[in-house]
């Protein structure tokens, strides 16, 4: 059930038994990585629990059916995954949805009567109990019962079609971090730190291709009023704040990954927009990049040293210099800048929202030996703690290694022509034993690799249809069990709405061939598959998509 008023429907209902940190009442955080992990976590932690808040999980499954809770348990779901399971929408007692109904304008939830129907009993059952044994056993097919069965069949066929249309595409709604911040604001409990976290949540959706550029900009504009309210200070002495306080400011940010913590040259080569436009995987592309830097007046000695060590005049003017010369080299404004926010505390620590997002994501998907997902989650919380600069520096270093692994893998794909056409889609698989292959066993890193690979391939191929073809990419997951992690992403020219159709396609292809697959991820377009079943699965997928 959708909640109209999050405060009265969620927070006030919860506060009688448990409240959150600002009200000094205990709660338990349990990180989960997939559907099976969610079930296990609920079993282990549900004793005595009456209220369960599910953040970025649970919306796409029937939580009551999957978790089998007691009748007194209430689930509050704040999840950006779409579509939302219809059972969650119409369960008015145990499931409360903390979502914006405007997110469902493009794909409305079906009407209740079109997907649910009360069980009908045969009018004939029991009516002839006094008749002879022969007539009692004989099933009566009079006109009324035939008509009822026909109506039932037509209703079920229509229901199947309606549910297929509703669940056909995987999309994403408003960031859960943004929704939670708005709840805190309505309760007058919002702070600058919570505002910064909501900015990171919105930025994360954009960087991982979960939201459109227009939706991202709209959310950024909505946050601007809160940024002004929390960070506007007058010039009077009593309005002065400590230099160690968090200050958030709007800025058109360069779309160059981690450039403040790297070199300009490396950042250009490891950012999807600039790398693909310059085709840095080719000698000609490297030459064009050097020409671009020279025309801007950026010496290589400056470009290849850490940004913090560059000449102060160049650092200050780098954005304007790139914008001034980008048209000549085929760069568009969307490839170069994005509206964003910076956070600063103290004189030294100035952070870009995109950089912190990449650092936090890299920490969550750390491949360090001995670290469990829970360990990574707790380390990611440390990264979000602005006073823990050591954790952030380590996370940024890990994010750089991830980006380097992605670009190196793309170079391999292109050099040995591993991106192939299967007819209705492109596909490629990372070979077992490839350097840094463990990075790609994680969903977010695999998403970035897939998108980067598709754009890189489209930038160098002569195939004019490439931009109209989706990509299926596989990465080794567990060599001992013989499994691979597979992701499907839509074609570039159809990805403006960020709708992914591979979730349903994967399910149907697996079902028709009895392929051993595991659809455990909360993102339906990512799945696990046995390597031995790859051939028959892809045959079915090709047939399905033609």
Image (cartoon, rainbow, N blue to C red):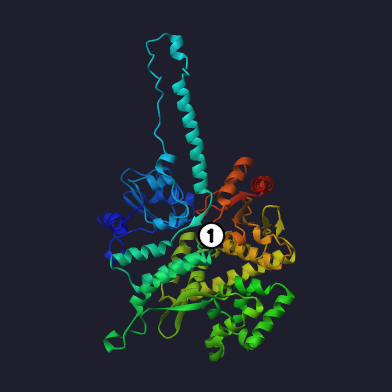
Vertical comparison of 126 with 536: above or below: above
**Whole-percent x, y for residue 317 in the image:** 54, 87
Residue 261 placed where, x, y %? Answer: 54, 79
Residue occupied by mark 1 = 497
Viewer-closest of 23 and 300? 300
205 is higher (above) or lower (below) than 394: above
Residue 204 in view in this figure: no
- Horizontal side of 325 relative to 2 (left or right) equals right
Q: Which residue is at a point 37% across and 82% down the rendered structure image?
A: 244
Picture coordinates of residue 232, whole percent (x, y)? 34, 80
The structure residue drawn at horizontal position 60% and vertical position 74%, both measured from the top left corner, is 332
Name the residue at 48% across, 50% down: 35
Would residue 344 be seen by someone viewing this image from the given angle? Answer: yes
Where residue 77 sits, quadrant-wise, is bottom left
Residue 350's quadrant in the figure?
bottom left
Question: Would residue 194 be found to the left or right of residue 331 on screen?
Answer: left
Residue 468 % position (x, y): 65, 59
């Amino acid at each position: 059930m959708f909640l109209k008023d999050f405060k009265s429907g969620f927070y006030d209902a919860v506060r009688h038994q448990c409240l959150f940190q600002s009200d000094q009442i205990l709660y338990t955080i349990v990180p989960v990585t997939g559907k099976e992990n969610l079930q296990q976590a609920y079993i282990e932690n549900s004793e005595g629990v009456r209220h369960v808040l599910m953040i970025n999980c649970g919306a796409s499954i029937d939580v009551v059916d999957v978790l089998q809770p007691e009748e007194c348990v209430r689930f509050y779901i704040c999840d950006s995954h779409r579509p939302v399971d219809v059972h969650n929408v119409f369960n008015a007692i145990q499931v409360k949805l903390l979502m914006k109904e405007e997110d469902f304008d493009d794909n409305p939830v079906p009407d209740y009567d079109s997907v649910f129907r009360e069980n009908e009993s045969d009018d004939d059952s029991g009516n002839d109990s006094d008749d002879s044994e022969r007539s009692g056993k004989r099933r009566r097919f009079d006109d009324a019962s035939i008509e009822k069965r026909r109506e039932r069949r037509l209703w079920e066929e229509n229901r199947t079609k309606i549910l297929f249309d509703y669940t056909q595409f995987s999309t994403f709604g408003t960031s859960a971090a943004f929704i939670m911040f708005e709840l805190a604001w309505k309760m007058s409990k919002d702070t600058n730190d919570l505002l910064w976290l909501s900015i990171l949540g919105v930025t994360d959706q954009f960087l991982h291709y979960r939201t459109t550029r227009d939706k991202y900009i709209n959310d950024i504009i909505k946050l601007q009023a809160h940024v002004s309210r929390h960070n506007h200070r007058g010039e009077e002495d009593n309005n002065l704040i400590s230099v160690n306080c968090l200050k958030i400011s709007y800025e058109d940010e360069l779309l160059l990954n981690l450039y403040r913590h790297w070199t300009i040259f490396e950042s250009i080569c490891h950012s999807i927009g600039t790398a693909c436009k310059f085709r840095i995987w080719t000698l000609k592309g490297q030459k064009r990049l050097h020409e671009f830097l020279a025309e801007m007046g950026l010496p290589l000695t400056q470009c290849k040293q850490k940004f913090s060590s560059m000449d102060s005049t160049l650092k200050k003017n780098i954005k304007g210099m790139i914008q001034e010369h980008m048209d000549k080299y085929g760069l568009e404004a969307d490839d170069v800048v994005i509206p964003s926010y910076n956070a600063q505390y103290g004189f030294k620590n100035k952070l870009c929202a995109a950089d912190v997002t990449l650092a936090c994501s890299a920490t969550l998907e750390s491949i360090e030996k001995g670290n469990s997902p829970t360990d990574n989650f707790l380390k990611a919380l440390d990264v979000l703690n602005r006073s823990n600069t050591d954790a952030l520096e380590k996370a940024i270093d890990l994010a750089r290694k991830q980006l380097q692994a992605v670009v190196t893998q793309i170079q391999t794909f292109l050099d040995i022509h591993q991106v192939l056409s299967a007819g209705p889609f492109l596909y490629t698989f990372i070979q077992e034993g490839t350097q840094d292959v463990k990075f790609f066993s994680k969903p977010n890193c695999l998403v970035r690799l897939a998108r980067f690979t598709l754009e890189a391939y489209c930038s160098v191929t002569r195939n004019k249809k490439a931009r109209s073809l989706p990509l299926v990419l596989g990465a080794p997951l567990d060599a001992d069990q013989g499994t691979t992690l597979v992701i499907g992403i839509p074609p570039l020219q159809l990805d403006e709405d960020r709708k992914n159709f591979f979730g349903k396609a994967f399910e149907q292809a697996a079902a028709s061939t009895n392929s051993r697959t595991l659809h455990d991820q909360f993102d339906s377009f990512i799945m696990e598959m046995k390597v031995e079943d790859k051939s028959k699965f892809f045959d079915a997928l090709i047939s399905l998509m033609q």
